[in-house]
Image: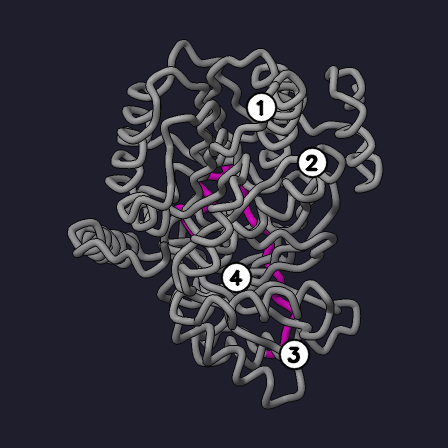
Amino acid sequence: MSFENLGLIAPILRALETQGYTTPTPIQSQAIPVVLGQKDLLACSQTGTGKTAAFAIPILQLLYKQKQTEQTPSRHIKTLILTPTRELAIQIAENFSEYGAHTGLKHLVIFGGVSAGPQVQALRNGPDILIATPGRLLDLWQQGHINLRYIHQFVLDEADRMLDMGFIHDVKRVITKLPEKRQTLFFSATMPDEIAHLANSILTNPVRVSVTPVSSTAEKVEQRMYFVDKNSKRSLLIHLLKNPDINSALVFTRTKHGADRVAKELNKVNISANAIHGDKSQNSRQRALTDFKAGKIRILVATDIAARGIDVDNLAYVFNFEIPNVPETYVHRIGRTGRAGASGIAISFCDDEERAYLKDITKLIAQSIPVITDHPYPMSQSPVPVKPAQGVNLRQSSSQQVQAKKKQHHNANRKWNNRPQNKQYS
C-alpha cells in the first residue's frame, strides 16, 4: 500500500514525497482512513511506529478541506494536541511543519519552562492547530489567552505517560473545557485501568487499533546484555564507545544526577556528550538535542521522561546504562532505535542489584536477551553461568534475593504513587 491509496490530497502527498515517505506504517495505514472518516480513534501503539504521522496527516487534510469551504477565514483554534513533554511537543510541531508545508495551515506549540510572552503573542495570530503540554495550556486558558470552544479534533498523545507524570487530573480539566461534539483521537502505548477508564469516558464509538503491543520489541533491534559490577559500568561504556562504528548513541540512566555524571565522565575522556533531563532549562535541553541530531555531540545521556520526543533518524545504538525498574520502559527505550523499519542495536548493563528488573523484562518480552561475556569488566561474581549470546538464565539466582528485591521495588513504587504531584515537566 502507498500513501496515494489512502486518498490523501496532492499538497500532502507532495510533502511526504519531499520527506522520502512512500509506504505507510501499519498504524498509519489503519488510523488515517479512520481519522479522515471523522470517527473517534483508540490506538494502542508504542514509540517508533509512526503514530504522529497517523494523526497529523489526516488532521491536516481535514483542516485544509475545511479552509477551502470557508467564506470568512476563521481565527479560532480547531485542533488541540495534548502531549506530556516539551520535547515531544516540539517534535510533533516539526512533523506538522513537514507534512503541512504546502497547506497554508498554521500551528503553534506551547509548553512551560520558558517565557509565556512570545506564546501569547503567537496565539493572537490565530493558529489552526495548537500543540501543548497540560500545565502551560491551563495557565494560558485561565488567563484568557486560549479559547477551546471551537475545537474540532482533540488528540491525547502518550496518555499512559500523562498518568506516570501525574498530569492525568490536568488532562481531565482540559477535557471539561472542550466542546462535547468533537472528534477525539486517543493514543497510548499501554492501557492501565485508569487510562482505559479515561478513554471510555471521552470517546464515542471509537475504532480500536492496536499495533506492536508494548511487550513486543522492535524486530530489527539486536539486543545485547552485559553483566558488570555497578562501579565498572562507566569503564565498560567508555570501552565500548571506543568502537568507531558507534558514531552516535543515546544512553539512558534512571536519575538526573546519573545522567549528568555519565556525561561528565565521557567528556573527560574526549567523548563528546551532553545530558538531557527535567532539571535542565528548556533552552539547554533543546540545544543538546539539536547538537545531537546535527552530529555536534556524539552521545546524548537522557532520563526516561526527557527522552520522550527524542526522534533521531538512523539512530543505530541505544545503551541502557541502568536497567529500568519498570519493564515496559525497557521496550520504550530500545524503541528509540530500529525505527520505521531500520535496524539498531540495544546494549544493556546489568549489575547484581538489577537482576530482579531483568527478570521482569524478560518475562514481559517473552524472550531471553543474548549475553556478551567477552569484555574486560566481567562481574566479580557472575550471577549465573551463561553461554555467550545464548540468553539470560536466572533460574539459579537466589529466590530469596529476588523476592526481597521485588518487595523493595513494590514499596518504592507505592511511595512514588503517593508522592505530591510535581508539575516541573509541564
Spatial distance from mark 3 to mark 4, Cα to Cα?
15 Å
Q: Residue furthest front?
A: 72
**Three-letter amino acid code of the residue under disc 1:** Thr
* Of the two numbered discs 1 and 4 in the rendering, the one whose residue sits closer to the viewer: 1
Q: CA distance from mark 2 to mark 3?
A: 50 Å
Pick whichever, 170 or 325, lies toward us: 170
| Residue 55 appears in the figure | yes
Point out residue 190 in the picture as x, y percentages from the top left corner.
Answer: 42, 34
Residue hosting label 3: 239
Q: Is residue 257 left or right of residue 243?
A: left
Spatial distance from mark 4 to mark 2, Cα to Cα?
Answer: 42 Å
- First to last magenta residue range: 358-376
Q: Amino acid at mark 4?
A: Asn
Image point (60%, 63%), residue name:
250
In which quadrant of the rendered view does residue 339 lie? top right
Q: Amino acid at mark 2?
A: Gly
- Which residue is disc 4 drawn over? 320
Disc nearer the start of the sequence (3/4): 3
Question: Do the CB atoms of the residues marked 2 and 1 lie less than 8 Å apart?
Answer: no
Query: Residue 305: percent from the left, percent from the top?
Result: 42, 56
The CA distance from mark 3 to mark 1 is 64 Å
Q: Position of residue 1 (x, y in %)?
A: 79, 19
For image coordinates 48% across by 25% down, the residue present is 153
Q: Is residue 20 above or below residue 370?
A: above
CA separation in Å, label 1 and label 4: 54 Å
Instruction: Tally the numbered discs.
Output: 4
The residue where tag 2 is placed is: 104
Q: Which mark is residue 72?
A: 1
> Which sits earlier in the primary sequence, circle 3 or circle 1?
1
Left or right: residue 277 compared with residue 414: right
